[in-house]
Amino acid sequence: MMPERDPAVEWLVRDMRSHLRKRPKRHQLSDAGAYAFDLYETNTASMPTYELACKAGCGSCCAAHVGVEVAEAFAIVRHLHQTRTPDVFTALMARVAEIAAEVGELDPGTRWVKQVFCAFLDPDSQSCTIYPVRPLACRGYNSNDLDACNLSTANLDHDQPIPADAVRMLRAQQLRQALAEVTARMIDQDGMTDHAELHSALTAAHAADSELAWMRANKHG
């Protein structure tokens, strides 16, 4: 028996595909990712924030495993192309590749123990340097308990329970599922495309040279 489809995901898939029909094909992957980011912000803008422990300048969870969809990776790479000088971009992507080689294949628990921080975390301000295009996983994970976060970091315990905002997390998960399905349809595949660790996904997107090249290389049949 097939699992019941989430009607919210079905609606998001239709909405994303309608949006992308108006966009040039050469940027449809990054446009899909950027549109998903915008949808998340729009859909959570009116939600209360008084219970959230996450604040600017707290990077305690930025050594955690972060999975992203293909479209998110291309949206981030495109943003970096547009906002960094060529030299800075090259150096940054080299660092991203180094981190991918070190932790890209690790399970989340082992990754947490290693405490290798995201390439986009500013070590001085503890702020995200790609905040406008941060992944949906980062947007959706909002702790309600700073003490639990600190305990998880101090003990290097990935299994430490951390109360989080379930609604925001669900919104991000639904958007990721829709993105994976929309991307699969772009390359004539059934189901959803696989997600990958952030740095590994960015390295692969950068290596693909262009969004069209990636779609041609992964097109079914």
Image (cartoon, rainbow, N blue to C red):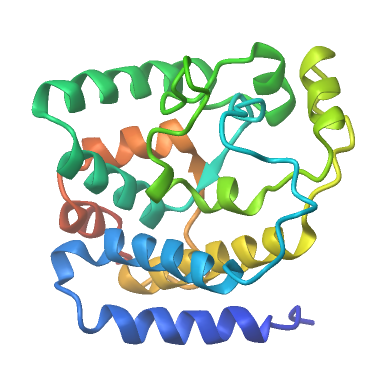
Q: Residue furthest left?
A: 86
- In the rendered view, would you say 169 is above or below 7? above
* Residue at position x 28%, y 65% in the image: 31
Does any portion of residue 94 appear in the rendered image?
A: yes
Left or right relative to 208: residue 139: right
Tell me: 158 left or right of 88. Answer: right
Q: Is residue 210 left or right of residue 197?
A: left
Residue at 63% over, 54% down: 140
Percent across and percent down for residue 80 are 24, 39
The image quadrant where one finds the N terminus is: bottom right
Question: In which quadrant is the C terminus drawn?
Answer: bottom left
Give the total number of marks visible in the rendering: 0
Q: Position of residue 28 (x, y in %)?
A: 25, 67
| Quadrant of residue 81 within the rendered picture | top left
Is residue 159 visible to the viewer in this orientation of the structure? no
Between 4 and 146, the one nearer to me in the picture: 146
Q: Residue furthest front?
A: 50
Image coords of residue 42 (percent x, y): 50, 72
Q: Going by the image, does 146 lie left or right of 66?
A: right
Q: Is residue 12 above or below residue 167?
A: below
Instruction: Pinpoint residue 44: horizontal percent, then vertical percent.
Output: 60, 68
Please name the residue shown 42% across and 23% down the image: 119
Furthest-right residue in view?
Answer: 161
